[in-house]
Amino acid sequence: MTDHATPPGPAAHQHIDTSVPHSARIWNYWLGGKDNYPVDEQAGDAYTAVFPGIVTIARSSRAFLRRNITYLVAEAGIRQFLDVGTGLPTAENTHEVAQRIAPESRIVYADNDPMVLAHARALLSSTPEGATAYVDSDVLAPDRILAAAADTLDFSRPTALILSNILGHVADYDQARSVVTRLMEALPSGSYLSINDGSRGIDPVFEQAQDAYNESGAVPYNLRTVDQITSFFEGLELLEPGVVSVPHWRPEPTDPTPETIAEHGGLARKP
């Protein structure tokens, strides 16, 4: 069992300021987690007062990720995961879903948020047969992520790259595409890419709320069009039903009738 994090980078030494709202803690609050402070709850409530649907988006995003991982482990036979921009640990984290089905699964999480680093031990729990590890690195440093992840993952074997609600934090679209390309270049044929992000052109109320949030001085999150999200999968084989509003991606038979929300994602295989 692996139970370690890479040596902290600069983010690890940043002071965790509990007097101002923090995007990862607000997201955690919307997911029903407990790793947040009153200031985050206040900011989250202010956002939901403008756009209550953000809670549905957050929880639908997590459900989409769970269904992706379940498919990858149970049907595609994937046993290695690189989860970049994981955020604060909540319920149904990547390692929990994967190792519940295949205890030998190996997972590396990467994030540069000091709050996430502080909670890394919760992410590093693992079955004895498998392994988990945490890389303290920014998504814009893919080579550092890959080098550190190689201590836990065998990149000669198919691996699933998970980019859940992280590419929106990369302001430049071309730069975001180059990050995806570099990470996928390191993975062999038979690997998979899972992406989901907030989408523009679906819900104008959501766009107004997010634009206002971005202008508040918080770390911005950039919504992208469905075509832009789809282009992240260029050169890969998209699985059915393609890039769709996340509740429509292979819903469980017991799920309620899927609604269309401004969060799109897909899963694709590297040929």
Image (spheres, grey):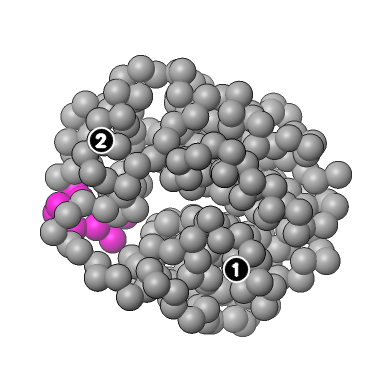
Q: Which residues are magenta?
A: 32-41
Q: Quadrant of the C terminus?
A: top right
Residue 251 location in percent, x, y?
Answer: 59, 32
* Apparent side of residue 119 relative to residue 41 in the rendered image (left or right): right
Look at 83% across and 51% down and name the residue there. Answer: 190
Look at 60% across and 66% down and name the residue there. Answer: 145
* Quarter occupied by residue 132: bottom right
Q: Quadrant of the N terminus?
A: bottom right
User: Answer yes or no: do the residues labelled 1 and 2 have beta carbons within 8 Å?
Assistant: no
Q: Secondary structure at mark 1?
A: helix
* Quarter occupied by residue 9: bottom left
| Residue 47 on the magenta segment | no
Amino acid type, callout 2:
Glu
Residue 39 location in percent, x, y?
Answer: 15, 52
Look at 77% across and 66% down and name the residue there. Answer: 155
155 vs 74, nearest the viewer? 155
| Residue 33 on the magenta segment | yes
Q: How many residues crowd mark 2 within 10 Å: few (<14), some (14–19), many (20+)?
A: few
Against 22, residue 253 (above or below) is above
The dot on residue 144 is 1
Residue at which label 2 appears: 215
Q: CA distance from mark 1 to mark 2?
A: 31 Å
Amino acid type, callout 1:
Arg
Residue 192 location in percent, x, y?
Answer: 73, 48
Q: Secondary structure at mark 2?
A: loop
Can residue 87 be seen at all in this image of the molecule? yes
Can residue 244 be seen at all in this image of the molecule? no
Against 255, residue 72 (above or below) is below
Against 245, residue 97 (above or below) is below
Reading the chain from its start, which is encountered first: label 1 or label 2?
1
Look at 42% across and 56% down and name the residue there. Answer: 87
